[in-house]
Image (spheres, coloured by chain):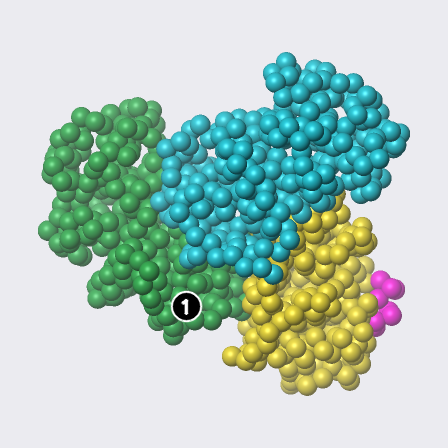
Chain colours: A green, B cyan, C yellow
């Protein structure tokens, strides 16, 4: 799964249903020795570990791949590395890469790729787990108002999420520093002042300040960002009674959100991480079933 | 298991008995898919590998965690990392960290922590495997004279070991450079000149010179340290007939011990490593059983 | 398996037959919990991953060993590290090390070592997988003409391969820059001008320019090397009708070989990688059976 725009709405609904079943104790184990690899060319705890747990729960054998000790350090291209893994017998790889659309160079491979984040492009498994978390709360996405706040321009989380939520019938609003907003985003949602947005939305998704992507252009002090575009206790108090707060994490405590609110009643941040494993299990199973692999299912 | 002072003597005896059973071929496998992670923020071969083998022998699924490629490199706190692993489904983590009492920040987690060494604090699994090795030799710890030599002030090995041995009825003696001895140690043992100590003890535990902890204050040449505070062949010849030599390793050959003595008849250094796997299996099983997990036992 | 000169021809033929059986779907699983480790002190994707897949297919438990985070970074010798792994219960280790004959220091261990490449010395599993690939093509090695081109002097691939092919009855030819040829190589083959060699051989093995080994002495521009000693389309057109092209990879595209030829009809480069897993399974099984371990075999 490279990006959700290539996946039918029926398939997405099937994946969301399967992910929910996994969260309720369903067990699926793949038949035979099937190999997966996780290629993370950017630092990650959550997503990499989440994929690894998902793979192991599905009974996949996980190959330890370290980008910086691989032959890529000897000058090998990503395509040659992927073709190598394919030849060696790896069937599926979760790949995170700082280059947007890195997958364009990898068309010529039979290995299934699950995009675990490409530069400022897409992050489909995050969108699926976010949708799953919202559905657990509201039973549906249709008709909800969902706000995404922060660096929406460079965020693959915003990009994948907004597209999916709009397609499933939500109204999407964006906020954050205006120079991080882009007319291209208007396809999926509208820009709103943050203090208006917090009162309006059912779901508030805060984005991480990606210091590693814009050292130069970002000149806020942490406390100033919190005051202007972060979730302070004052803003939290103005949210609708049942509205929830989400964040893809890792969190910059005291920047995007007041540290005390990270685990407040509205917060679904750790719930998102839990759901991440189930969402990735469903995605991996979907991709591997499409390649003809079989799973045996049971219940806990 | 954070430190042994929080564990009852009954529980320690149960763990030691279980560790011995594992060394004699007992097999325990955990029920279901249960995940462990090893978070080593300091270099390690022995302890990390030992935990990994122990976990896999117990049937745990082991998550590959690389501190330097984790979100900690994006500024995430250790607590948020641990809560993330907990949310993702990791049940137990062995943690080594250069910060003494790193675990104080981690009270608010349901994930079981096995302390694999905190700064100059504690190293409970080392103390358990050392006790196990001594009991294999002498049948008991009570009444033995145990000498610990080297940087006792900064050594978590000395700290955890001395406390346990004294509690189990041994007399503990310390030696080494006097500026590495501290009045606080007098609770657990007494200081003795090294040449007297070697003649007196049943068990001689040599500590590693931790070059990474005191570059500045340590100004011995290796051969001078060996001459003054290391186990030379001359000193070894003066030990009691049945006395044994131990070292937590890695060894600085020719510094703490004459290289030729590393595998001498008295040496239990490689035996300690063997026992390390069994001790860690017993600790992990103890912690996981306390969390309600079940194991099926059999014999080889 | 350290080097092939220590293995009887009967054993090599047994290994080649077993590797072929694995490629045709034979399954072998080791009895009990048996641990393997992969110690790669040089960057590698192919060989390390290949060993890991082979080990897991055989049902071995694979220990995650990271050279740069091990106690070797605290000054421990390779021997002490290996003896530690042995004490911890590791039965077999695949080792790659930049030091030629690193294994001489490791005689005193019961842990089985599979040499995954020592400096400019040997690389037996590469020779076995190359022989396997050639036999799949021609049914035998006897009587074939095999050319090895590039830095034959520093290449462990050339060294292990040439010895094996000659021993199995092939005629071996070398080419490449003359300062990379050595009289010592004459035992196994003869030097020939590259443009003559391409017309003569049944098998053309191109070696990787090992930039990491000879920054200083290598002063070709990539395009000049390709023109003089690389497989251009012009040279490829002059090869015998059934001749094949091999390369141990990673490939420097446009240096040893025109990028367009990497997957040409003659190329067995990705076939070699596939065979690598099966060859390593056969080698590991051979070594472990010699240590008394048992496997249960079945067919897919």
Tell me if residue C79 is in the magenta stretch. no
Decide which of C20, A8 is in the foreground and name it: C20
* Front residue of C4 and A220: C4
Q: Is C185 within the magenta?
A: yes
Residue furthest top as drawn: B183
Span highlighted in magenta in the image: C182-190
Q: Residue at x 57, y 47 (%)?
A: B18
Reading the image, the residue beneath label 1 is A30
Secondary structure, mark 1, is: strand
Q: Left or right: B294 with respect to A253?
A: right
Of C142 and B3, the residue lying toward us: B3
| Residue drawn 76% across the image and 75% down it | C11
Q: Residue at x 73, y 68 (%)?
A: C290
Q: Tell me if I can see residue B45 in this picture.
A: no
Q: Is residue A221 above or below residue A194?
A: above
Residue A202 is left or right of residue A131, and the answer is: left
Can I make out residue A144 in this image? yes
Q: Camera-side residue: A207 or B90?
A: B90
- Measured as percent of width and height from the top left, residue B263 is found at 80, 43
To which chain does the residue with label 1 belong?
A: A
* Percent coordinates x, y for residue C25 in the rendering: 55, 78
x then y, percent, for residue C106: 78, 52
Q: Is residue C204 above or below residue A299?
A: below
Within 10 Å of disc 1 (Cα), the crowding (few <14, some 14-19, many 20+) is many
At x 13% / y 48%, what residue is drawn? A144
Q: Residue A112, image x and y in percent?
A: 41, 65
């Amino acid at each position: 799964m490279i990006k959700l725009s290539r996946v039918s709405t029926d398939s997405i609904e099937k994946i969301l249903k399967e992910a929910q079943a996994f969260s309720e104790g369903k067990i699926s184990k793949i038949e035979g020795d099937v190999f997966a690899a996780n290629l993370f060319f950017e630092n990650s705890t959550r997503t990499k570990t989440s994929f690894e747990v998902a793979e192991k729960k599905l009974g996949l054998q996980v190959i330890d791949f370290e980008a910086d000790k691989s032959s890529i350090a000897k000058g090998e291209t990503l395509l040659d590395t992927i073709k190598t893994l394919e030849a060696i017998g790896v069937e599926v790889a979760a790949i995170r890469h700082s280059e947007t659309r890195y997958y364009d160079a990898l068309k010529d491979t039979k290995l299934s790729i699950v995009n675990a984040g490409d530069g400022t492009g897409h992050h489909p498994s995050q969108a699926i787990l976010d949708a799953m978390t919202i559905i657990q709360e509201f039973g549906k996405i249709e008709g909800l108002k969902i706000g995404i706040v922060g660096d929406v321009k460079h965020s693959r989380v915003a990009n994948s999420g907004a597209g999916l939520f709009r397609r499933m019938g939500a109204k999407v609003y964006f906020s954050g520093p205006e120079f991080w907003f882009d007319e291209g985003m208007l396809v999926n949602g509208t820009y709103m002042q943050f203090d208006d947005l917090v009162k309006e939305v059912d779901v508030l998704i805060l984005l991480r300040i990606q210091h590693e992507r814009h050292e130069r252009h970002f000149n806020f002090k942490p406390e100033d960002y919190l005051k202007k575009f972060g979730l302070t206790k004052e803003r939290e108090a103005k949210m609708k009674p049942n509205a929830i707060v989400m964040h893809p994490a890792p969190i910059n405590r005291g920047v995007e959100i007041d540290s005390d609110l990270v685990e407040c009643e509205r917060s679904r941040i750790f719930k998102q991480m839990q759901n991440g494993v189930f969402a990735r299990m469903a995605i991996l199973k979907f991709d591997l079933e499409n390649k003809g692999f079989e799973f045996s299912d049971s219940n806990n």
